[in-house]
Amino acid sequence: MTVTRWMPLLLLWVCCHYEVQPSSLRPIWKPPQFPCDVKANESEVKFDCRGRRLRKVPDGITRDATVIDLSENYMPNITGPVFSGLLNLTTLYLNWANTRRGLRIGDNVFKNLTKLNHLGLTGNNLERIPGNLPPSVETLDLGLNKLQLDKMNLSGLTYVKNLWLPKNCYIWMPCGRNVTIMNSPFAVMTKLQTLDLSFNNLTHVPQGLPRDPHVSEWVMSNLRVKLEEEGEKYLPLCLEERDWVPGVPVLENLTHSIQYSRKTLFVLTEGYVKSGIFKLAMYLAHQRLMDENVDVIVLLMLEPVLQHSRFLRLRKRLCGKSVVEWPRTAAAEPWFWQNLRNVVRVDNQLMYNQTYSKYLTSR
């Protein structure tokens, strides 16, 4: 009878005692046998290993993995063929992979990931870009590292479309000097569409930023010929490839071109509207409108971009004739060129919608 009476009390006392014991006596947290959460749907298989205190890439990630997140862990290095069998991997996040110190990455770690499209390496104190990245990588995030931007070799990144390099020389990652990027290191990145160099103590915008070769060829062989060599009136252009002063910073050349030109013609493509140079040029053109009350903006839509842009909708309402679209058929091209010549010759204010002009053109 004694045992029967005391057993419930004993069990209750043990449970309560375990709950109130100090944290130093509680069992140390240990990861389960497989530390990652797995989520799968029709389009992807994601292994979420974020913030699991991992010191190495865990075993057990299956070959059908398409997305792996290993961010915010304690991995001091990643070397060897740890990802070699994951041939379906498209996205790999290694942001702050070692939150205690830096991360060391071997040169051939990502070499065999032939479907890898997005690689995130933010916040790892990297001093160099990992070598032998597969040509499938289109987006590479290298922000908050310790890369020497003026000494980078980008010859292995010719396929990258989106390159993020912010804060490699910043308050959190101080390099103690101004950074001047010379010798046009980005010129080899012929597919580059988006480049982020913010917060890096840069002295000026780097020269030799790549542009779409098809657009450049179209400008030189079509736009230049139609405006400068054909038509009733000669309409000279100021072209970067031909007329900008070599060795002068991009900002100075761009400012001078916009300031002393009758019109600023933006040839819009999907890649160009995402670039920083487009935003800067648009800002300078708008600044001239604010300072001098002179509207110089002409938008040539070589591709159907900015379709949901409020700016474009307002532009079409205010001065619809200053927005011209490349025709879908060859038969309409003569009309397009004649219309463009008229737009370039006539002041934008004379083409304004009268409903809006009395509010936007008077001082």
Image (spheres, rainbow, N blue to C red):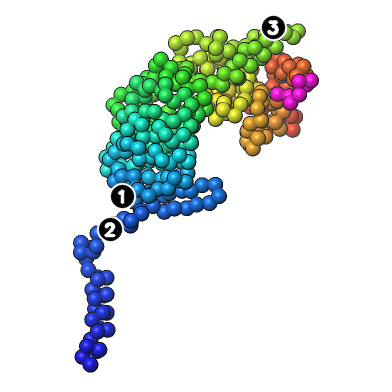
Q: How far apart are marks 3 and 2 (CA)?
A: 76 Å
Q: Residue 53 carries which label?
A: 1
Q: Residues within 10 Å of mark 1 (few under 14, many from 20)?
A: some
Q: Position of residue 139 (x, y in %)?
A: 47, 33
Position of residue 60 in the picture relative to residue 283 (left or right): left
Give, as a three-letter code, the residue at label 3.
Glu
Q: Residue 29 carries which label?
A: 2
CA separation, marks 1 and 3? 67 Å
Q: In which quarter of the image is residue 174?
A: top left
The residue labelled by disc 3 is 229
In the rendering, at what x and y percent does residue 323 appear? 69, 26
Q: In this view, does 16 lie to the left or right of 279?
A: left
Residue at 48% across, 36% down: 115
Q: Does the magenta stretch include residue 19?
A: no
User: Do the residues bearing badges 1 and 2 touch, measured as CB atoms within 8 Å?
Assistant: yes
Foreground disc of the pair 1, 3: 1
Q: Identify residue type, mark 2.
A: Trp
The residues bearing labels 1 and 2 have C-alpha atoms spaced at a distance of 10 Å
